Amino acid sequence: MSSFCRPAPASISPANLKNMKLETTMQCEDHRQCSLHLSVKGNLQLDENIYGVQICYLLLVTQKSKCVNVKISRSVHAQPEGNKVKVQFNCFEVSVGQHLYVTMTTLPNYCGVKQTQEYYVEDCRNNDVGENIPDCFVSKMVYNVDRTRKTISVNISDVQNTDYYVRLCHQRFVCEDMGPTTLIQGKDLVKSVTLQYTQLLPCLCIEAWPAILDARRMQLCPFKNDTKTLWDNIVYQPATQTLAWEAACPVHVTVSLCQLMKTNDQCVNLENTVNIASEK
């Protein structure tokens, strides 16, 4: 997507390029095996100094861009100047729920003669998309924990012969890798994988997603209510006679020292030992 433009001649104004419209279309090879495409339309006022338009889209999440040039045919150019023609391009392949920035400029690129628009591709809540796009087919993920071997076995079902990635991650602002990402192939008879973990922390999650660009991820965080493991990180410092604790997961807790009473087995907070740990 080039941002360079040249001054427009006197015969050209912003009115030469108008009414850009975007819509999602669907192309299907077989039942429930469809893909999404972006259709871009616009009106171009003919001028001898314009030989076509350039249409570009930018995927805002990854900054990936793609452009195509649509040139005006000789038969169209033979029409009187000032006539308006419709320009249309249907073949940008897009994915479910993508956020796009679309531009349409003249060829050559004249300054100030430009159409821009943000666009959200329909997601799986749309009935047609949800029923026909493989990304939206709901697979099932079940797991089993072996605390002796410190492993989690994950099984994926209803994958529609699609390859799947599976990983363990720690949920913070994003879910951070906690080991290798494993591929389960759609052709495999057994759709399962065994993943190694170090601690069953509240923020430990299992993620699975189709092995395609920008696929929607399934996520399970089955240990989020089990905070006992967090206290394994308490360390005693003999030199300073202090206890140190650092949360291995983002949590908001109040920490204090307490004295265990022999009479009733209650732990009574000691004064001036209270600290508040915020999520981070």
Image (spheres, rainbow, N blue to C red):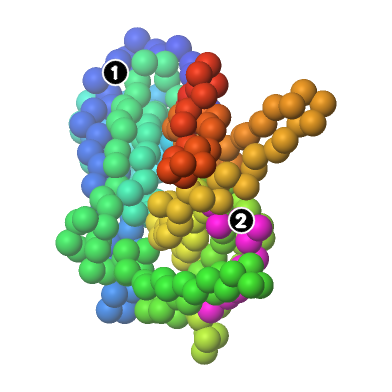
Residue picked out by circle 2: 199
Q: Residue furthest left?
A: 127
Residue 132 position within the rendered picture, expressed as x and y whole percent measured from the top left: 27, 69
**For residue 128, what is the image quadrant?**
bottom left
Residue 143 vertical placement versus 256 (above, below): below
- Residue 147, image x, y percentages: 59, 69
Q: Identify the residue at the far right of this view.
A: 239
Camera-near label (2 vs 1) is 2
Disc 1 crowd rating (10 Å Cα; few below 14, some 14-19, many 20+) is some
Against 124, residue 158 (above or below) is: below
User: 250 or 155, which is in the foreground?
Assistant: 250
Q: CA distance from mark 2 to mark 1?
A: 61 Å
Along the line of sight, which residue is nearer the eye, 17 or 242?
A: 242
User: Which image quarter: residue 112?
Assistant: top left
Q: Residue 14: which numbered mark, if any?
A: 1
Decide which of 275, 267 is in the foreground and name it: 267
